[in-house]
Image (spheres, rainbow, N blue to C red):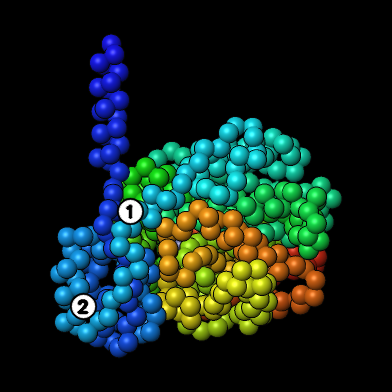
Amino acid sequence: MRFEILSFLFFFLLKNHVASKRYTNYTLFRSVPLNSIQLDFLRTMGKAYRVNYWREPGVINKTVEFTVAPEDKEVLLKAAEQNNVDVTTIMEDVQQAFDKQTVATYIRRRLSTFDWQNYYRLRDIYVWLKDLAAAHPEEVVIQSIGKTFEGRHILACKVNLKGTRKRSTVIVEGGIHAREWVGAAFVTFFIHQIVNSPSSKNLALKMIGSTYEFVFIPVTNPDGYEYTHTTDRLWRKNRVNRHGVDINRNFGIAFGTVGVSFDKDDEIYCGHSAFSEKESQAMAKIINSYSSTLEYYLAFHSYGQYMILPYAHSQKHQENFDEVARICQTANNKIKHRYGTIYTVGTAYDTVGYSTSGVSGCWTKASFRTPYVITFELRDSGRHGFALPPSQIMPTCLETMDGVVSILNPKGKKLSKIQSSYGESVVTGTASAFIVNNTSIRMFNGIVIITLLKMHF
Ligand SMILES: [Zn+2]
C-alpha cells in the first residue's frame, strides 16, 4: 500500500516535471536594429533559431527582446555577427528569474492573505473574488461571462458602490495574454482599491469609486493563464485545440490585416475568423451590454511601460487621439511622481513600433465610440520583462493606480466630441448585431447621446 502511494507520488512528480517546460540556461537577449538589413535579420531569425520574442521586431531603432535555447545560442550569435547585428545579454538564465516569481496560496475567507507580494493561481484569484463579493453583497457581483475551450469560467467582477451616481461605465480587462502576470495582478488590485475606496484617504479615489460603475475581467484568458503556471511560463495565447489563438488579435476590427499570423504555431495567430474564440465572444457580449453607458475601456498588459491609444492597425492619430493623449500624459506625470517610472504615450506604431489588428479596445472604440480606450503595457522597460520579480508587483500596482485615478478623475474633463458617423469603419464580425437600428444610445458625462451610426462592412 505504502509502495503504491509512493509510486503514485513519484509518477505524479515525474509527470509534472515532464509536462512543465523548463527554461534553464535560456538567454534573454536585446537588440536594436539600426537599418533595414538588421531589422530583417531580427524578423527572420524567429523561425530559423526557435526564438521566443518578448518584444517583437517593429521598426528601425525599436528595441527587440527574445529568448533563445542554449543549444541554439552559439549559432544565432554567429549569424547575428555576420549580419552586423549587435546583441546584448539581458538575462543569462531565464528559468532562474521565473523561479523567483513566487506563487502564493490565498486562504479562503481571509481577504488579507491576497497581498500583491506574490502571484496567484486562477482558482485563488477566483475564490478571492467570490469572498470579496460575499463581504460586499450589495456592491460586488461576480458573474461568469462565458466558458473557455477547456471549460473554465471567465469571471467578471461588477462593482457598483452604494450611492454611486451611475454616470457611466468603466470596463477593465486583464490577463488576455497568458504570460503577462502583472497585468492580471494589477486588475485585482484595482478591484480592491475601488471596493475599499469609501474608506480611502485619497479623495480623488473616493470620488471615482462613487462616480462610475465598474466591470472588471481580471483574467480574460483563464486557460492560457493556468497553462503558464502548470506547463509553459511563456505561453501567450488561449489553449484552443492545443495550438491556441491570440485573443487580442481575434476581435472584429481590421481582422487579419496587420501584425498577425495565420500560422497556428505562431504567437500572434489570430484565428481563422474574427470572434472565432470563446474569450473574444464573451468579451464582445459584455462590452456590448454596457455600450450605452461605456465611457472607459482600459486593458492591462505587460511589458514596456506604454499607454497605447487606438487604432493599433493605423499609423494615423484618429478621432479624439489628442485629447486622450493629453489625459495620458497627465497620468504619466502622476505615475512618475511616485517612483520615477516613465511611460510612453501613443498609438501601437508610435510606441512598440508595429501595427496590429483585431485588438479588443480598438474594436470597442470603433463599435461604440467609446471615448477613452487605453491599453497599458505595465512594468518594466526590459530588465526583467515577463519575469518581473514579486517585489515589483505592489510598486507597479501603486504607481499604475495613481495613473488610473488621474485618468478617471472627472474634474475638469472636457466633453469629447462624438462624431455622428462611423466614416471608414473597419468593424467586422458580430458588431452589426450589437447596434439596434443603426442607433447607439449612450450616456456620457451625464448627458444622453444618441448617435446615428453608418456602418460599412
Ligand atoms: Zn499583451
The amino acid beneath tag 1 is Gln
In the rendered view, does 81 fall on the left or right side of 97? Answer: left
Beta carbon of the mark 1 residue lies under 8 A of ligand 1: no
- Residue type for callout 2: Ala
Residue at 52 percent of width and 37 percent of height? 105
Disc with the residue nearer the chain's start (1 vs 2): 2
Q: Position of residue 421 (x, y in %)?
A: 62, 77
Nearer the camera: disc 1 or disc 2: 1
Assess disc 2: are there few (<14), some (14-19) or many (≥20) residues with their C-alpha within 10 Å of its C-alpha: some
Residue 24, horizontal then vertical, whole percent: 27, 53
Residue at the spot of label 2: 80
- C-alpha separation, residue under disc 1 versus residue under disc 2: 24 Å
Give residue 95's mark.
Answer: 1
Q: Which quadrant does the N terminus fall into?
A: top left
Depicted 15 relative to depicted 371: above or below:
above
Quarter of the rendering containing residue 110: top right
